[in-house]
Each structure stands twice: as C-alpha cells, then as structure tokens.
C-alpha cells in the first residue's frame, strides 16, 4: 500500500503547476456538470410529475362528469362501454376504477367486479387517501412507485344533481419519452464523466513521460522571443512531432531576427496608408475603443458634426454627438462596449439588424445654418483575431440628404402621375362603355361629343407619357447635335400651336424678335420643346384678357459698342398670377408642381424640369422673375453661332 502511494506521489510531482491546476479544474467542472445534469434530470421529472398531475385532474373531472349520470341510473353496461372506449383510446391511462359511496368497487379496468355475485364472492373496496373528502368536490392526487415508474393516482368525487354517488379513481402512466430521456441523460453523463477522467489520467501519464521537459524548454524560448530576444534557440535531440516543433521554433527565431526591421517598416507604411484612406473617403468615419473613446475621426465626420475646431480624440463620443444622434446610439453603444453583440443590442432596442453584425440608424439634424441634413449611421464591431472579444466599434456616417429628398420627390411624382392617369383613363373608359352599351340610343352629335372627349383624354395621357420619356432621355448620357439656328422659326411655330388656345381664353400672344438677330447654336427640337412648355405654362396661369410675350434680342458685350453681340437672350413674359418667393426656390426641381387655389390645373410638374435640362444641354441656365398678381418672366441666354449664313432648317437629333 505504501509503495503504491509513493508511486502516485512521485508521478504527481512530475506534473507542472498548470497541469495540476488543469486536472483539478477538470475534476471540478466534471463534478459541477454532473451535478447540474442530475439536477436537470430531477427538474424534468418534477415537471413531468406536475404535468401528469394536472393532466390526471383534468382527465378525472372530465370522465367523472360524463359517467356520473350512468352511475346514478346504475347503468354499469353504459359505464363499461364508455370506460372501455376511453381506456383504449389513450396510452396515458393505467387504470379506471369506480366505487360507490361506501368504497365498494362497482367497475374497473383492466379488472372488473363479477356480474354474478354469491355468498362466496369477496367484495373489493377502494383504498382512499387520508386527505380525501366527499364533502369537498375537488380531485385528490397521490403517487405510488411501480417497476415502470411513478403512477399518479387521481380520486375524483362523483356527484349527480348534488347527490354524492361515489368516487372515480384513475391512474396516469408516467410520460415514457420523459422517462427514457431522463435515463439516457443520466447514463450518458456517467459515461462522459468516466471517459473524461480516463483521458485525463492517460494524458497525464503521457505528458509526464514525453512532453513536460520539451514543453518547458519551448516555454522558456517563447518568453525570450516575446521579450524580443530573437537570438533564442533550443537544442534538444528529439524526433517526431516535438522535434519538428523545435526545428520550426528555431527557424521562426531566425526569420524574426532577419525581418524585424522590415516588418516594422511595412507595418508603419500600411498604417499610414490606412489613415490616408480613411481621411479621404467621402463618408464620415469614427473609430472607437471598447470604452467608447474616439481613436480616429476623419475630416468628413468632423464636418458633419461641426467638430473642425474641437479636440475630440480620446474623448467620450456620447458627450460630443448631437442630441438626436445620442438618443438613438447611447444604449446600443453601451451594450456593445459591455460585451454584447450588435444583434443582442438590436433586440433590446427593437431595431432590426441588417446582414451580419451591422446596425443602421437614420437621423435628421438641423445645423447652425438652419439646413436640415439626413444621415445614415452604421455601427460595425471590431473583433480580435479569434472573433470572440470586442476591441472597438467603427461608426460610418453617410449624408443621404439628396437621396431622401429624391425619394420624397419620386413618391410625390408617383402620386401625381397616378392621379393624372386615373382621371383620363376613367373618362375614356366611361365614354367608350356608354357608346358601346347605349350607342343606338344616342344622337350623332352626342356620339361625336363622346369621341372628342375620349380623344382629348387620350391626348392628356400622351402628353404625360411624353413628359416622362423626355425627362428620362434628357437626364441620360445621350448626346445631341447643335447647329446654327434661326430662333424665329421655333418661336413662330410655338405661337401658331397655341394661337387657338390663346384666342379661346382671350389672351394676347405677342412676338418681339429683334431684326437681323444673329443665329444661335442650338437644337431645333429641344428649343421648340422649351418654348412650348414655357408658353403653355404662361397661358395656363394667365387669366382671361392677359398677355403673353416671347422676346428675343441680342445682348451687347459693351453698352457703348453697338456692333458686337455676346449672346442672344430669350424672354417669355406673362401677366398671370405670379409665383410665390417660396415656390421659386423649387420651381425647377423634378416633380415639383404649383397649383392654383382650387387645384384644377393639369400637369405633372415635369415641364420646367425638362426646360432646365434642355437649357443645361445648351450650356446655359433658365432664370425667372416673378411677382404674385403681376406676372412672371422666364429668360435664358443662347450662344451665338459664328457662321456666315443662317440655318433656316431645323437641326436633327443625333
């Protein structure tokens, strides 16, 4: 016995402190896990027992309520049929016994009272629990142990019209799945516990015999390497995997010694490249450490949050963010810094996570200049090499103000187009249906009127589709051909187009073109579309008796030089309702629409946007001067084409 004890002591002394601690930790962990497993098994069994009890009570009350009328009528045949069907329909019931008020068994499954009784028959009585009371109309539960497990006995008093008839006893089998699972869990836990310790003992023996000394040498060498002593070498005559490990260690030391300076230089260069890249990206970038201190802030982020003159490096981010941003980021950032993943932080703040470990916020800020900016803020975790611990947080800030405005404009455009499409389509359908169904009852004049109305509504649809297509074409990269052009031609064609419309509204159309006006460099079709849109708008917003004028004249380089013309200016003036100063700021935006007080004017809000795009194609800009109640003037300049002869024919589109 003493010899065996000495062997164990000597064997144990061969282990390093780490190995001993590992063995002790393994023992503690295995014991804790085993305890937790048995506790879990016991909890499962208790939960199953509670479920069986609840199920048995409900089942007993159900059976008692259905059988009580049969017991009251002494219909044991009916009781037997009902009980037999019920017993055969479920495997959870172990037995069903009915006893009268004195405890004598009337009927039972799987055994039953004999139907023929004589002097030799023995009466069987049901043994009731001590806490059973026929006065309290409530089930009583007890349990007894069998080789198949614990059986739950439920005793339910039977009443019919407030008369106590006896007691129903029903037995509930234990849940076989829970029993099997508990037994399997217990057996697996014991097997795992034994296997772990068998492996620990075998590993300890192998460690003490072949690994401990080389590992100690390697540990010393690694410490020296960590202390930047790259001349450290290990000389042990070992083969196999340990020999290869020692050889690789020595080779690593040689390479580290050779490339130390080179690696440091490369790392410094890469760091400089990264900082330059972050500083030049269009999005704002903020790098935080795990304590939410700012480590890096690029110029874009400083501009977005007005930090140009503020020292923020090393400071807490939440103390410098605007209030609207802090209210959204405070809790997620604190959760992440405390070790939670972004998805867990999102679940707490009810923010849906995007793909991966990245969260998106959208905030609107009002800067000191009273301009509103919408920012998209993205949070990304910075993890260590093992992707286990959070080392910091990267915040990316994107200015999506224009994108938001464009989305709002598109939504408004879709709403306007839908409204404009719905009305003519409804009118066309209505008049065509009327012609189809009641054509024989209509006069020729009525039919002609219906067809004219449908044709008018079709023209409205055509104009709407053409406006959308024109704007799409102008905003594309399509190129146009510009040739010498006499402005009198497109202006004259525009006036002829709107002559009847102006006459109907009693509006005077005036053409004022300077004599001997030099030709301009332009595209006939595009400029015709500009005149058509501007004159059409002028007629639309000018009341009856008003005046619309198209004027074209040369602008001199020097007022004293009456010979040299720098460019040609075109003005379209009306005496209409005018445009508010507030609307003038957005009148040329896409999808913007100015309506009159009763919202009856047709249009999609694309006409002036098309005019703006066409003038930009001609390297100029359209301007306006307007006063509410007095009228509006749109004007733009066109470059003079230096040619000897005027071009009298329209230019073709490339």
Image (tube, helix red, strand yellow):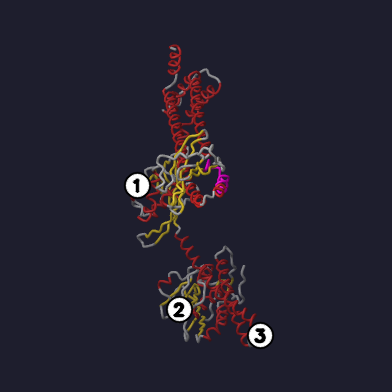
Q: Earlier in the sequence, mark 1 or mark 2?
A: 1
Residue 346 image point, x, y percent: 43, 49
Residue 443 image point, x, y percent: 63, 88
Q: Residue lying farthest front?
A: 119
**Neighbour class for label 3 at 10 Å: few (<14), some, many (≥20)?**
few
Q: Earlier in the sequence, mark 2 or mark 3?
A: 3
As helix, strand or loop, the secondary structure at mark 3 comes to helix
Residue 73 image point, x, y percent: 51, 52
Residue 161 image point, x, y percent: 45, 54
Q: Earlier in the sequence, mark 1 or mark 3?
A: 1
The image quadrant that residue 497 belongs to is: bottom right
Residue depicted at x 43% and y 69%: 585
Q: Is residue 180 above or below residue 428?
A: above
**Neighbour class for label 1 at 10 Å: few (<14), some, many (≥20)?**
some
Q: Which residue is mark 2?
A: 598
Q: Quadrant of the C terminus?
A: bottom right
Q: Which mark is residue 212?
A: none
Range shown magenta: 81-96
Q: Is residue 557 above or below residue 23?
A: below
Q: Which residue is mark 1?
A: 316
Q: CA distance from mark 1 to mark 2?
A: 55 Å
Q: Quadrant of the N terminus?
A: top left
Using the rendered image of the protein, determine whether residue 455 is visible from the camera's viewpoint: no
Q: CA distance from mark 1 to mark 3?
A: 84 Å
Does the magenta segment cover residue 90?
Answer: yes
As helix, strand or loop, the secondary structure at mark 2 comes to loop
**Neighbour class for label 2 at 10 Å: few (<14), some, many (≥20)?**
few
Closest to the observer, 550 or 337: 337
Q: Which residue is mark 3?
A: 440
């Amino acid at each position: 016995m003493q010899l065996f004890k000495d062997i164990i002591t000597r064997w144990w002394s061969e282990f390093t402190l780490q190995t001993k601690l590992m063995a002790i930790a393994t023992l503690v962990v295995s014991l804790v896990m085993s305890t937790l497993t048995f506790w879990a098994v016991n909890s499962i069994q208790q939960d199953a027992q509670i479920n069986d009890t609840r199920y048995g009570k409900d089942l007993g009350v159900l059976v008692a309520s259905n059988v009580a009328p049969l017991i009251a009528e002494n219909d044991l045949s009916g009781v037997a049929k009902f009980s037999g069907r019920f017993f055969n329909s479920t495997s959870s019931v172990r037995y069903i016994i009915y006893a009268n008020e004195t405890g004598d068994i009337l009927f039972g499954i799987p055994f039953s009272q004999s139907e023929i009784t004589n002097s030799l028959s023995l009466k069987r009585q049901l043994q009731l629990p001590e806490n059973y009371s026929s006065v309290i109309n409530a089930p009583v539960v007890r349990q007894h142990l069998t080789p198949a497990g614990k059986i739950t006995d439920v005793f339910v008093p039977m009443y019919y019209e407030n008369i106590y008839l006896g007691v129903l006893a029903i037995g509930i089998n234990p849940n076989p799945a829970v029993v099997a699972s508990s037994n399997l869990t217990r057996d697996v836990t014991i097997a795992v516990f034994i296997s772990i310790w068998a492996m620990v003992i075998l590993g300890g023996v192998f460690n003490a015999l072949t690994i401990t000394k080389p590992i100690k040498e390697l540990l010393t060498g690694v410490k020296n390497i960590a202390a930047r002593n790259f001349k450290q070498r290990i000389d042990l005559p070992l083969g196999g995997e340990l020999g290869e490990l020692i050889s690789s260690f020595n080779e690593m030391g040689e390479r580290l010694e050779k490339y130390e300076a080179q690696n440091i230089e490369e790392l410094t260069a890469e760091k400089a490249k990264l900082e330059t890249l972050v500083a030049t990206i269009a999005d704002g970038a903020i790098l935080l450490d795990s304590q939410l201190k700012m480590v890096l802030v690029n110029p874009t982020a400083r501009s977005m949050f007005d930090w140009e003159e503020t020292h923020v490096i090393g400071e807490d981010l939440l103390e410098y963010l605007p209030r609207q941003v802090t209210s959204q980021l405070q809790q997620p950032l604190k959760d992440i810094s405390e070790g939670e993943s972004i998805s867990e932080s999102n679940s707490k703040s009810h923010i849906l996570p995007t793909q991966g470990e990245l969260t998106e916020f959208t905030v609107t800020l009002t800067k000191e200049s009273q301009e509103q900016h919408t920012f998209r803020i993205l949070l990304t975790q910075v993890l260590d090499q093992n992707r286990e611990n959070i080392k910091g947080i990267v915040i990316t800030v994107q200015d999506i103000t224009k994108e938001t405005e464009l989305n709002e404009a598109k939504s408004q455009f879709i709403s306007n187009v839908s409204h404009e499409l719905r009305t003519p389509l409804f009118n066309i359908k209505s008049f065509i249906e009327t012609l189809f169904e009641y054509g024989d009852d209509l006069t020729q004049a009525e039919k002609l009127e219906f067809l004219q109305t449908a044709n008018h509504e079709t023209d409205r649809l055509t104009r709407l589709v053409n406006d959308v297509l024109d704007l799409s074409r102008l905003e594309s990269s399509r190129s146009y051909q510009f040739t010498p052009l006499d402005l009198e031609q497109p202006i004259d064609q525009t006036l002829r187009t709107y002559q009847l419309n102006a006459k109907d509204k009693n509006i005077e159309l005036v053409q004022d073109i300077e004599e001997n006006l030099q030709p301009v460099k332009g595209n006939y079709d595009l400029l015709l579309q500009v005149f058509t849109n501007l004159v059409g708008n002028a007629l639309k917003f000018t009341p009856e008796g008003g005046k619309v004028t198209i004027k074209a004249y040369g602008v001199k380089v020097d007022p004293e030089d009456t010979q040299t013309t720098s460019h040609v200016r075109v003005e379209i003036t009306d005496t209409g309702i005018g445009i508010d100063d507030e609307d003038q700021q957005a009148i040329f935006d896409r999808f913007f629409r100015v309506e009159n007080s009763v919202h009856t004017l047709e249009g999609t809000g694309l006409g002036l946007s098309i005019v703006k795009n066409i003038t930009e194609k001609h390297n100029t800009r359209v301007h306006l001067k307007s006063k509410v109640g007095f009228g509006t003037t749109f004007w733009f300049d066109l470059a003079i084409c230096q040619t000897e002869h005027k071009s009298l024919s329209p230019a073709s589109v490339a």
